[in-house]
Image (cartoon, rainbow, N blue to C red):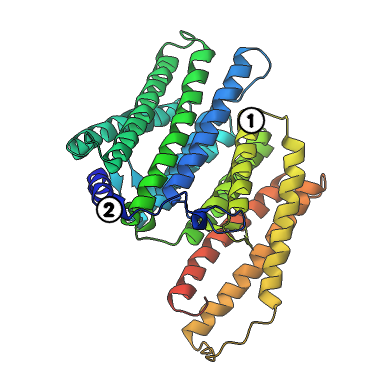
Amino acid sequence: MPEKYFKNVQDNYERQINPCNPAMKMKLSEETNLSLEVILLLAFGLIMVIIGAVLLTVAAGALTYYVEGVYGLLLVMFGLQLQTTGKIPIGFVKRSWSVLILGIIITVIGFCTCFVPGILGNIPKLLVMVIFGVGSILLIVQFFFAQERYWLGKTHANRLIGQLTLNCAAVCILEILIAGLIAVDIYLPGIYSTNLLAVCALLLGIALFCLAFTLQNVYRTDPESDMSAHTPGISLDTVMGMQYGFYMLVLGCLLVPINLGLLPYALSAIHGTLVVLFGVQALVAGRMMTLVFRRNWIFLLVGMMFVAGGAFAIIVPDIVVEHLMIFIGVLIILGGFYLLYTLVRPKQKSEVPAKKPEGKDLQLMILLLVLALLTAILMILFGASLLIENLITGIDIAIILICFGLSQLVLQYVLSLAVRKNLIE
């Protein structure tokens, strides 16, 4: 994959559009031309900067932080990246069910780590250590062998390739260093100061920003090298819709022992994780729950703000949790009513009359309608429970969340079948 980047960039640089051209000036209302991989790198960079800044204030004694939340958040992002881009350390793969299941497992482990302190012991730390450490080592080896004959020249293209190489090397070295610090923390806790990890996290965030900007220049020079845009697999709308199903299902199942007093829970991290999902869905698919938006620069900034706010709520407990509950409740209720509206609004007349479904297709559309109606009702109930204290408590909310999660997962599956059969657009 890197060899394709470097060769195509070198061959096609002269055809690159001049970014200083007035026609290329960015307008906030215009749709973004950022690669999906670049967008996720920016989100990762933002999260690492927030982690670094929080750890610096923790070292100064101004804040406390939720250790498990840091690792859970990183695992959630790793899992989402794998599911949406098919990106692994040695390149891109088809987003098949096997890749999707691996990403889902990582994401679910991240959910559990965020929701219940210490439920998985050192497993989240070990996973982050392996992904950072082993993944970065593999990437360094791949870059060394793929581009050694391309980046040492004096052309503009080769300078761009050299810049990409240095940025990748910086990211990989910092990730390996952080993996080493995590290993030390597991086996020799307390041997280094929090300041060291904070500085490494800040530097990694800055390096990820630099890598994202350089990579976007590469993709602008040679769009064909953007593998995240050409990786076949399940639609991004379906993938991101499934995340809410798994979130609700995991949370509902964990709330049963939590309500029985058998497990602790991190309320701020629970809601912060949902806000991160809102932000990532906005960045990746241009949606937020059932609400659909245009993927312009304004919505990109909104998505980044959601990721930042959710990450802060996960890492720093209880500071913004009350405001988050109100915000999430209102947003989910709006999403539920919007879904109901989409079910009853009159459809626009098309030039070509739509084919009426018959037989099994009709049964599929009826099932889709029932699932959408059930999901909308459960969304409104869940949102209302966040706004009105003691409206739904105990095991009842756990049952609602489990039903919500199952209905969302089945809805996404049935919806994908309907789209595949051209029953809906």
Q: Residue furthest top?
A: 191
In percent of width and height, residue 166 lies at 33, 30
Can residue 118 be seen at all in this image of the molecule? no
Q: Residue at x 41, y 46 (%)?
A: 216
Left or right: 175 as drawn, with respect to 364 = left
How many other residues sit within 10 Å of disc 2, few (<14), some (14-19) or many (≥20)? few
Q: Position of residue 342 (x, y in %)?
A: 67, 72
State how far apart marks 1 and 2 are (Cα): 56 Å
Nearest the viewer among 244 and 202 is 202
In front here: 181 or 99?
A: 181
Task: Say which residue appears at 64% left-offset and 82% top-offset.
Answer: 347
Q: Dot 1: within a 10 Å radius of its alpha carbon, few (fewer than 14), some, or many (20 or more) residues?
A: some
* Residue at the disc numbered 2: 12
Mark 1 and mark 2 lie on one chain; the one further toward the N terminus is: 2
| Residue 158 showing in the rendered view | yes
Residue behind mark 1: 264
Q: Which residue lies at the image location 26% right of the left edge and 34% below the top edge?
A: 138
Give x and y (percent) for residue 204.
Answer: 45, 27
The type of residue carrying mark 1 is Pro
Depth check, mark 1 against mark 2: the one in front is 2
Quadrant assignment, res 111: top right
Above/below status of 190 relative to 258: above
